[in-house]
Each structure stands twice: as C-alpha cells, then as structure tokens.
C-alpha cells in the first residue's frame, strides 16, 4: 500500500512573528501620536518609548522615521475611510452619496497627515515607493467599495471606476496640499463632489 504523503507547510518562526508584531505596533503607535498632536513633530525617541521598543528598531524596520510616518499616515487614512464607506452606504440616492462622501472625506482627521507624507516624498525620493504602495491600496479599496455599491443600487459612473477613484482622491489630497502650502482659501471652497461622476436613473446621462 502506498503511503500517503503529508504536506509540510512552512510556518512563520517566532522571530518573524515578533518582527511583524513590532512593526505593526510601531505603525499604530505613530498613527496615534500623529493624531493626538496634529502638525507637531514626533521624535523617534517618543515613538520608541510609546511602542516599548528601542529607538534603533525604527530604522531597522522602516529605514527612517519619515518612512514610518508615511506608513502611519496611510494607516490612519485607511481606518478613516471605513467611516466614509458607512456614510456612503446610507445615502438614499447618488446625488446625496456624492455630497455626503465629499463632505466626509474633507473632514477626515488623517488627511493632513497624508498630505504631509506626500510633501515629504517630493523632497525625499526614497519615500516614493512607500507612498505609491499605499496610494495603490487606497485606490483599489475605494474602487471595490464603489463597484459593490453601484452594482447593488443600479447606479452608473461616467468613467472607469479606477479613474473615478484616482481622480477623487487626487482632488481631495491636492486641495489639502494647496491649503498647507499657503494657498488662499480652505478645503471647504472645493467642490469635491464635482469630482465624482456616479449617478442614478433620475439624473440624465
């Protein structure tokens, strides 16, 4: 009788698990500190103390504090988008959806931190791959959310959903960057809802 082969699956070693846990904790702690102190500089020593690790572990896992800040900023944004999605699902029609989504996104507490991360990537090219990684995740998550919503509601979009997601977030983040750079006005002056082309049967094509 032929012996049954047993499949051996590789399992993470305790050291790998600890590394993932430490990395995750550093990101979450940094996101919390940045949220509690918007606009303030957070030092590596403060981050390490709050996370219960050594300061050199920041550079070990992320290469630099700036890279960690980028990870933390986008983690905060992805958490905030869950609330935005709940607001979107509650909209009774497409016009209300566009208006409520725009208002909710412009009031997100994490948006200024992400704008700072984008600005840092301009002057520090080594951060570009980190920023791009998180932006692509944000775009894909938004595209999936809108796709499920319009399929369930029978709504339509006047352009491909990947373009819809990129255009919307580029407009929102661009507005925050302009305000932070000293442009006259506030994000409230922006018609972010106009960056969305999602509509229902009551609205003409």
Image (spheres, rainbow, N blue to C red):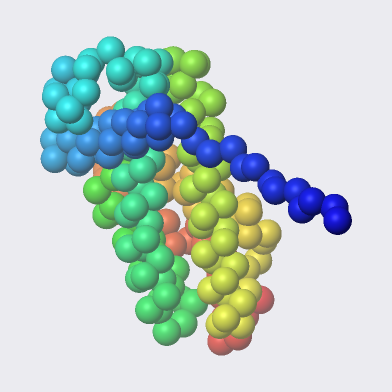
In x, y percent, where is residue 153?
56, 82
Along the viewing direction, whichever of 11 and 48 lies nearer the viewer: 11
In the rendered image, the quadrant that contains the C terminus is bottom right
Q: Residue at coordinates 53% horizontally, 39% vertically from top-left? A: 11
Residue 33 in sight from this viewpoint: yes
In x, y percent, where is residue 44?
21, 18
Answer left or right for 31 relative to 74: left
In x, y percent, where is residue 190?
37, 52
Q: Residue at coordinates 38% horizontally, 56% vertically from top-left? A: 81
In x, y percent, where is residue 52?
17, 27
Q: Residue at coordinates 46% horizontally, 21% vertically from top-left? A: 127
In the rendered image, the quadrant that contains the N terminus is bottom right
Q: Is residue 202 above or below residue 11?
A: below
Along the viewing direction, whichever of 180 and 92 lies nearer the viewer: 92
Along the viewing direction, whichever of 24 and 172 lies nearer the viewer: 24
Q: Residue at coordinates 34% horizontally, 52% vertically from top-left? A: 79
Where is residue 104, by image quadrant?
bottom left
Q: Is residue 96 above or below residue 21?
A: below
* Residue projecting furthest to the top: 56
* Residue projecting furthest to the bottom: 202
Where is residue 182, by image quadrant?
top left
Answer left or right for 31 relative to 82: left
Total numbered labels? 0
């Amino acid at each position: 009788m032929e012996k049954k082969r047993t499949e051996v699956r590789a399992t993470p070693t305790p050291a790998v698990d600890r590394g993932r846990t430490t990395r995750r904790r550093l990101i979450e702690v940094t996101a919390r500190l940045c949220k509690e102190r918007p606009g303030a500089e957070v030092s590596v020593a403060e981050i390490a103390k709050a996370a219960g690790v050594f300061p050199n572990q920041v550079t070990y896992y992320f290469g630099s504090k700036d890279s960690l800040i980028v990870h933390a900023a986008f983690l905060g944004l992805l958490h905030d988008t869950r609330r935005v999605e709940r607001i979107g699902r509650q909209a009774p029609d497409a016009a209300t959806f566009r208006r409520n989504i725009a208002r909710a996104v412009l009031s997100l507490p994490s948006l200024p931190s992400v704008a700072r991360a984008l600005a840092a990537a301009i002057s520090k090219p080594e951060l570009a791959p980190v920023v791009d990684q998180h932006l692509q995740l944000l775009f894909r998550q938004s595209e999936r959310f809108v796709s499920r919503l319009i399929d369930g509601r029978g709504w339509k979009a006047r352009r491909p959903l990947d373009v819809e997601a990129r255009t919307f977030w580029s407009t929102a983040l661009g507005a925050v960057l302009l305000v932070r750079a000293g442009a006259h006005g506030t994000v409230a002056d922006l018609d972010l809802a106009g960056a969305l082309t999602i509509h229902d049967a009551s609205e003409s094509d």
